[in-house]
Image (spheres, grey):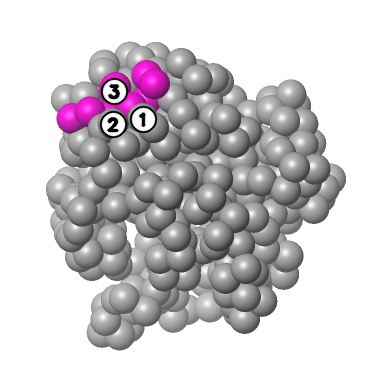
Amino acid sequence: MRSFSPRMAAQALWQMRVRRRPFVLSHGINARCNMNCRFCEYWKKPGKEMSTPQILKMLDEAQEFGIGVYNAWTAEPLLREDLPEILQHAKSLGLTTSIITNGLLLLKRAKELQDLDLLSVSVDGIKSYKQLRGIDLQDVLDGIREAQQAGHEILMNCVISGKNVAELDDLVALAESMGCRISFEPMHESSGIEERVWSSLRIQNIPAYELAIDRLIELKKSGAPIINSVTYLKMIREMEPRFNCHASEIILHVAADGSVGCCRVHQLPLANVSEGLEKAWQSSQEKRCQIVAGCEGCLFFGYVENSLLFDFVPEVLAHYEWI
């Protein structure tokens, strides 16, 4: 396990601010999932996936370009049989390796992930989990324990919705009892999901939501294993993205078919790594800037915290815990 260190922070800031290049390669490694969550649009978009040789070539070019972190996610990275080979290659290049998983296959595959540095598992509720995800939470918790036995430190990711807002306290307690850290972010209402789904999931009771976030801030300050900064938690309490977004500058977003996009919100293909990673980055730069200029903003945890790091926000610089 390699956590975010002051040395890595310096490396990231040099790459992002001086070289004006991305530090994280965020790779939607496949178009398949073993869950059919109503609020997720990624599994609804079946399509081509890069081959193993194509991914390894992309990683070679990423390392040459100065990228320091390889993050595999969406729709479900553990469905790729070649994932251990991909992680091994990334690690051999000196990249920090990370995956985001729903955790359902961890019980089967955790021991194959010896070249993984950062393991994030989506845990969006306790009593509400089955309603949100369609499976029993215990299956995922068993996988987390298997991963811990294999030597992995776990970050639980919770997307806050109207279904789980009353359980945030309990989720922190669950993470603490299992020796995990936890992060929170509000659900983003993407245009690819039907309005009837959002009407059942969006946060309706605003006072209850604000009290729940106030409690997270209190727990964070008292030492609970919440990795969000207080700066971010205060931002999501007000549901206002009061930050300068640098997501399209510091993260290279590559979809399963190799297309390069601006970010998770704006997924229009702008280039493809098949033309060369550096060329794809450069050829998409003007369009990315245009998209960001017209964006109303979001509250995705990774985008906000990394942008705050980029802008030298003191709290984030001093206590950044995860990529």
* Residue 142, image x, y percentages: 23, 29
Helix, strand, or loop for circle 1?
helix
- Magenta part of the chain: 81-89
Q: Is residue 82 magenta?
A: yes
Q: How many marks?
A: 3
| Cα separation between marks 1 and 3 | 12 Å
Whole-percent x and y of residue 244? 73, 65
Helix, strand, or loop for circle 3?
helix
Task: Answer whether labels 1 and 2 touch (C-beta < 8 Å).
Answer: yes
Residue at (62% x, 68% y) in the render: 286
For residue 209, above or below residue 47: below
Q: Amino acid at mark 2?
A: Pro
Which residue is drawn at the image coordinates 41% and 75% (left, top)?
189
The answer to which of 155 and 82 lies nearer the viewer is 82
Query: Residue flagged by tag 3: what amino acid is it?
Result: Pro
If the image is split into quadrants, where does the C terminus sit?
top right
Answer left or right for 263 relative to 245.
left
Q: Is residue 219 magenta?
A: no
Q: Which residue is mark 2?
A: 53
Drawn side of residue 118 relative to residue 13, left or right: left
Disc with the residue nearer the chain's start (1 vs 3): 1
The CA span between labels 1 and 2 is 5 Å
Question: Which kind of residue does numbered mark 1 sit on?
Answer: Leu
User: Can you identify the residue that label 3 sits on?
Assistant: 84
Q: Position of residue 302 (x, y in %)?
A: 56, 51
Check disc 1 and report the residue beneath it: 56
x, y percent for residue 5: 69, 25
Placement of 125 over or under 225, stated as above or below: below
Q: Nearer the viewer, mark 2 or mark 3?
A: 2
**Circle 1 Cα neighbour tier, 10 Å, few/some/many (<14 / 14–19 / ≥20):** some
Q: Earlier in the sequence, mark 2 or mark 3?
A: 2
Q: CA distance from mark 2 to mark 3?
A: 14 Å
